[in-house]
Amino acid sequence: MLKQLYIQNYALIEEATFTPGSGLTVITGETGSGKSILLGALGLVLGERADLDALRRPDAKCVVEATLIVPDHWQAFFETEELDFDRETILRRELSPAGKSRAFINDTPVNLKLLKRFGRSMVDIHSQMETSRLTDRSYRFALLDAAAGLEEEVHIWQKTYRAWLDLKSELKRLIEAESKSKLDLDYFRFQLEELEALELEHIDPKALEEEAELHRNAESIAEANSRVNYALEEDERSVIPALKELVQSLDKVANVHQPSAQLRDRLKSVAIELQDIAAEAADAADSVEQNPATLTRVEAQLDKLYALQSKHRLNEASELSELRDSLREKISSIDSIDDRIAALEKEVQLQEEELRTQAAALHAARINAATRLSTEISDALSKLKMPDAALRFAVEQRDNLDAHGCSDLSLLFTANKGSQELALEKAASGGERSRVMLALKSVLSYHEQLPTLILDEIDTGVSGEVAARMAEMMQEMGQHMQLIAISHLPQVAGKADCHYRVSKEVRGDSTFTRLHLLDENERVEELASMLSGKAVTDSAREHAKALMTH
């Protein structure tokens, strides 16, 4: 229930406090006085999109606060969303001059989606545009499902339906991918065969390069090492024999001259090292063999490596192994796509069977609810002086599944006995639509158990006895819920438990919207004015008092 609405710096409202009663609260005022501004402020604090033009003073902050009496069963919602629960919960919306919008629930910042979800569960605003929404298929289903108490079942259905659509999309993607992949498969296999023919796991590009260079320079290597061996050991003037002679000379004086002994030892070491070098050079010369066939084979391998590296635009030949592994994975994925498609097709089919079971259950529940709801609304229309009118929720089964299951839903209306049923938008006049909408809201208010319902000029286009009947219905609705009605009808205002008047006043160069709670005498004057115009007569006052008699 809405306990209080506080508005600051919004449109023509400088500051206002609205405290509706727990039953029927009526708001009256001349056209253009600002009644819609009040609803706009309420919509803002319930999560509607903010507009900078809503600021009365562009240099000041706009604040709208709604204090709600929240039922205890909402405590679980607060805990889930990590909010502080309070029976008197405050929703606050702030709009800064810079355009920054902030929302709070009990002083905890929240996003607009959460604010709207909670706010719209507590307060239902019926605007003048909502009557036209009866032509909207989704809106009709929302009405019927609410009356049938199917909200949880519909939520589960829609979640499962979306998952099924996702599966179908994935299946379609796989089938399209299969078609394209099959075209690529032969090319991938050809590329893989080229790479696997090289036996990359047994090839080291760097080692191949070294081997090729060795074979290209085999003759030079052998010649160089042979010259070393010859110069050190085999030439007439070779170094090693000469060193041996020098060692022998120093050996003769080593016993008597210590420095000569040291030189002798050093020359011996040099001679031994040179002997090793000469032997290794001889071995190196003998081991290097020029083999044109081996060179040709190695260069052929390198040519294939570099050709594939260039073909695939790789920086290093070593990256060919990574490419080969990637191609293997692609081919394996393509080869297995048929299995994945088959598995997914089965999953889609099983999910569809489950959906059809759920849809059939929803459809049956809707048929039962539609029969009951149609009867209740027709009874309500009878109270609104339409005894022969009938509004029927026509539920038909369809083969294809959609977001609403396997049901189609039409609203068929007839105002007169024996007349053909037609779509509501074609069969009902403006005044009849107003009564139909009130009848709908009256019946649904019992099923939806909304704490607060706001009706914005739902009585447009009616007068006289019909207006009196609508007023009685609103009064009856106000006995089991909080009902706030914006109305131009004195019959409706006369049934109010709480009556506010919205008016404009000019102060200096500025116009302000003023919200005023009327006392008993002021209510009489307001109703008398609504009945007779500006020139209020005593008879109008008496008529007003009669209307106020419950």
Image (cartoon, rainbow, N blue to C red):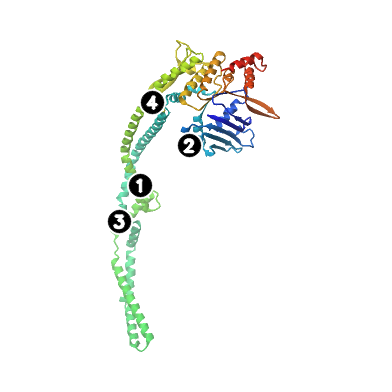
Return the x and y of residue 322 as percentages of the image width and height: 36, 50
Return the x and y of residue 299 as percentages of the image width and height: 33, 56
- For the residues labelled 1 and 2, the Cα–Cα distance comes to 51 Å
Mark 1 sits on what residue? 326
Name the element at disc 2: helix
Foreground disc of the pair 4, 3: 4
Checking the image for residue 496, the label placed there is none
Mark nearer the N terminus (4 vs 2): 2
- For the residues labelled 4 and 2, the Cα–Cα distance comes to 30 Å
The amino acid at mark 1 is Ser
- For the residues labelled 4 and 3, the Cα–Cα distance comes to 76 Å
Name the element at disc 3: helix
Is 27 in front, or is 158? 27
The amino acid at mark 2 is Phe
Is 433 in front, or is 234? 433
Q: Residues within 10 Å of mark 4 (few under 14, many from 20)?
A: many
Q: Residues within 10 Å of mark 2 (few under 14, many from 20)?
A: some
The residue depicted at 54 percent of the width and 26 percent of the height is 22
Mark nearer the N terminus (1 vs 2): 2
The amino acid at mark 4 is Leu
Return the x and y of residue 83 as percentages of the image width and height: 49, 38
Is 503 in front, or is 127? 503
The residue depicted at 30 percent of the width and 52 percent of the height is 199
Mark 2 sits on what residue? 78
Q: Is residue 256 above or below residue 210?
A: below
